[in-house]
Image (cartoon, rainbow, N blue to C red):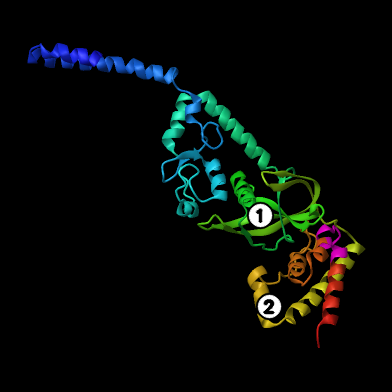
């Protein structure tokens, strides 16, 4: 109405007065706009206007998809675990998923930090608390229920289930790059002993699958287990070999050398094709350690041998739980003796 009234008034005024009034109006307009902007800063910013449509919380590390929709980074990744499409418009994001180039929407982040500082600090604190909880490698350690894993032995994994995609990503986001591996159990869900695996590399595919290169680090015993977001977690106690001294140490060294030579004989007796396949997967057999009891897990060649011997997981599990190197070596010697006797002549 004001604009119409002004137009009517301007029709009856001379051209010079009109142009003068326009300049005057522009000056008034400029003056009026500035206070309006300040009122927006203080009064009209609502935190709900900057909420993620997936988690219904204030945006944290906002990213914008090629189709123009903005989400929290973690929220978007979790949706893409289940379906490689935009959660809102269902546009295909397969190539975006492969490249993993999640660039933050800097403008959105700056708006939140500038106009909603208290809400931003609270949201940041909440995120840090979640990360601290997930990075604890004694309590609530993520557990991958799949196969047997051993210290110092590579364990490549093919990840395709959404819950394990989430688990692997969280391990990388927290910076620990570690999770537990346990053998499955029909009654308990998984067995009471396992091995901590460290992620060395991840290769992603357009459908969301990934191949994860891991290596065994530490053995542990399950104290208590629970579930989180579809995957298992557990409170664990780490295992170490009990060290011996004096006569017991010399006897242990003698047993170690004898079993190592016996293992070499068995490895050399394998067919060239078998040996090549084993070394391609697990690498060559490690050499003797310079100090027998230097590692809390014992000599690495023992674990390499246990991984390549044709034993079922249930037969391998007791070796993982042993904290006596002497008992482990004695058990390996019995297995090698059985293998040599049962070999067809």
16 or 311: nearer the viewer: 16
At which x and y percent is residue 298? 79, 61
SS of the residue at dot 2?
helix
User: Image height check: is 99 above or below 64?
Assistant: below
Residue density around tag 2, few if under 14, some if 14–19, many if 20 or more, within 10 Å = some
Q: Is residue 309 magenta?
A: no
Q: Are marks 1 and 2 in contact (CB under 8 Å)?
A: no
79 or 323: nearer the viewer: 79
At which x and y percent is residue 297? 78, 58
Earlier residue among tags 1 and 2? 1
Q: Residue at x 76, y 65 (%)?
A: 303
Q: Is residue 242 visible?
A: yes
Q: Quick check: 294 left or right of 178?
A: right
342 or 138: nearer the viewer: 342
Residue density around tag 1, few if under 14, some if 14–19, many if 20 or more, within 10 Å = many
Q: Is residue 324 magenta?
A: yes
SS assignment for the magenta stretch, majority: helix
At which x and y percent is residue 150? 74, 61
Name the image quarter holding residue 174: top right
Return the residue at label 2: 275
Q: Which residues are magenta?
A: 318-328
SS of the residue at dot 1?
strand
User: Image height check: is 132 above or below 318?
Assistant: above
Q: Is residue 290 visible?
A: no
Q: Residue at x 74, y 64 (%)?
A: 300
Return the residue at label 1: 198
44 or 214: nearer the viewer: 44
User: Image height check: is 164 above or below 153?
Assistant: above
Q: Residue at x 74, y 42 (%)?
A: 139
């Amino acid at each position: 109405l004001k604009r119409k009234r002004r137009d009517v008034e301007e029709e009856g005024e001379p051209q010079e007065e009109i142009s003068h009034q326009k300049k005057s109006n522009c000056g008034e307009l400029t003056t009026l706009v500035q206070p309006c902007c300040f009122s927006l800063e203080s009064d009209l910013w609502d935190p709900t206007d900057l909420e993620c449509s997936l988690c219904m919380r204030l945006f944290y590390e906002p990213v914008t998809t090629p189709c123009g929709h903005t989400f929290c980074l973690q929220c978007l990744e979790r949706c893409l675990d289940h379906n490689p499409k935009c959660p809102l418009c269902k546009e295909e994001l397969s190539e975006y998923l492969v490249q993993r180039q999640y660039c933050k929407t800097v403008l959105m982040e700056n708006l939140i930090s500038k106009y909603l500082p208290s809400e931003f600090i609270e949201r940041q604190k909440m995120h840090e608390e979640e990360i601290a909880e997930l990075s604890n490698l004694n309590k609530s350690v993520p557990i991958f229920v799949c196969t047997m894993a051993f210290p110092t032995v590579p364990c490549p994994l093919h990840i395709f289930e959404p819950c394990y995609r989430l688990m692997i990503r969280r391990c990388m986001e927290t910076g620990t790059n570690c999770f537990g591996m346990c053998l499955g159990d029909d009654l308990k869900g998984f067995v009471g002993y396992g091995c901590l695996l460290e992620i060395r590399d991840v290769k992603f595919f357009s459908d969301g699958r990934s191949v994860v290169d891991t290596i065994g680090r530490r053995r542990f015993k399950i104290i208590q287990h629970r579930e989180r977001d579809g995957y298992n977690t557990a409170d664990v106690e780490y295992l170490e070999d009990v060290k011996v001294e004096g006569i017991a140490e010399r006897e242990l060294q003698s047993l170690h050398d004898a079993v190592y030579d016996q293992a070499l004989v068995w490895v050399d007796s394998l067919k060239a094709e078998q040996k090549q396949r084993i070394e391609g997967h697990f690498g060559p057999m490690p050499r003797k350690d310079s100090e027998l009891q230097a590692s809390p897990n014992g000599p690495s060649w023992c674990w390499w041998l246990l991984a390549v011997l044709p034993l079922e997981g249930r037969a391998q599990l007791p070796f993982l739980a042993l904290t006596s190197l002497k008992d482990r070596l004695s058990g390996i010697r019995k297995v090698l003796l059985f293998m040599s006797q049962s070999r067809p002549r």
